Image: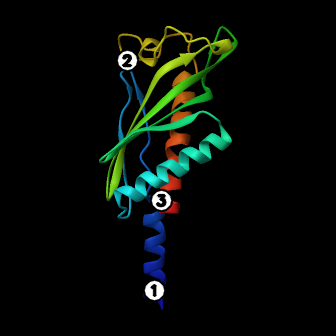
Amino acid sequence: MKKLWAILLLCHAVTALAQTPVLQLTPRGFEPVTYTLPRIEGGKFVDLARAWVTEQKRRHGQFDLSNVGAGTLTISGIEKNAFFYRSRGETFQHKAKLVMKVDFTPTGYTLTLTVPEIYAEGDTPTQYTLPDYFDSNGNIKEGYDGLKTSIEATANDIALNYYNFIINYK
C-alpha cells in the first residue's frame, strides 16, 4: 500500500511540475514555442482549430482561420487591450492584431506568434511594431513601463487557451 501511495505522489509531483511552454517577447518579437500532444491526426487538429476559432468569435468577435495546408494553419485576430504601458503617470492601452502560425505534427505543434499591427485610440494603426519599443541593448525603452509584462500575459493567455482547447477536446 505504501508503494502505491509513493507512486501516486510521484505521478502527481511530475504532473504539477510539467508546464506548458511560455511565449517570451524579445527585440525581434516572440520566440516560437513547441507543445507536445498525445497523438492526433492532422484532419482532427484542423477541425479543433476551426472549433477554437468559432469559440473565439463568439467571445471576442474578430478571429479567423486561414492558410490551412498540410501540417500548417494560421489563426489571426484582433485583441482588445492587448497591452498597455505607463508613461509619466498616464496609462495607454493598445489593441493589436495577433497572428498565430501553427505548424503541427501528429504529436505536437509549434506556435509562432507575431504582432503585425498595433492600434491606437479610434482603431487607428500606429507606425510602431513591437521591436520599436526596444532600445539597441535589447531592453524596453524608457517610458513604456508594463508593456512587456502585459503583452506577454495576453499572448500566453491566448496560447494557453488554444492549447487547453486542443488537449481537452481531442
Q: Amino acid at mark 2?
A: Gly
x then y, percent, for residue 86: 63, 16
Badge number at residue 167 = 3
- Residue beneath the point at 31% across and 48% down: 71
Q: Nearer the viewer, residue 48 or 20?
A: 48
The residue labelled by disc 2 is 138
x then y, percent, for residue 77: 54, 32
Q: Nearer the viewer, residue 22 or 115?
A: 115
Instruction: Mark 1: give few (<14), some (14-19) or many (20+) Cα within 10 Å.
Output: few
Which mark sits nearer the N-terminus, 1 or 3? 1
Quarter location, residue 26? top left
Q: Secondary structure at mark 1?
A: helix
- Residue beneath the point at 44% across and 12% down: 132
x then y, percent, for residue 59: 67, 42
CA gap between label 2 and label 1 equals 50 Å
Q: Is residue 122 left or right of residue 5?
A: right
Q: Is residue 35 left or right of residue 78?
A: left
The residue labelled by disc 1 is 4
Q: How is the image coloured?
A: rainbow
CA gap between label 3 and label 2 equals 35 Å
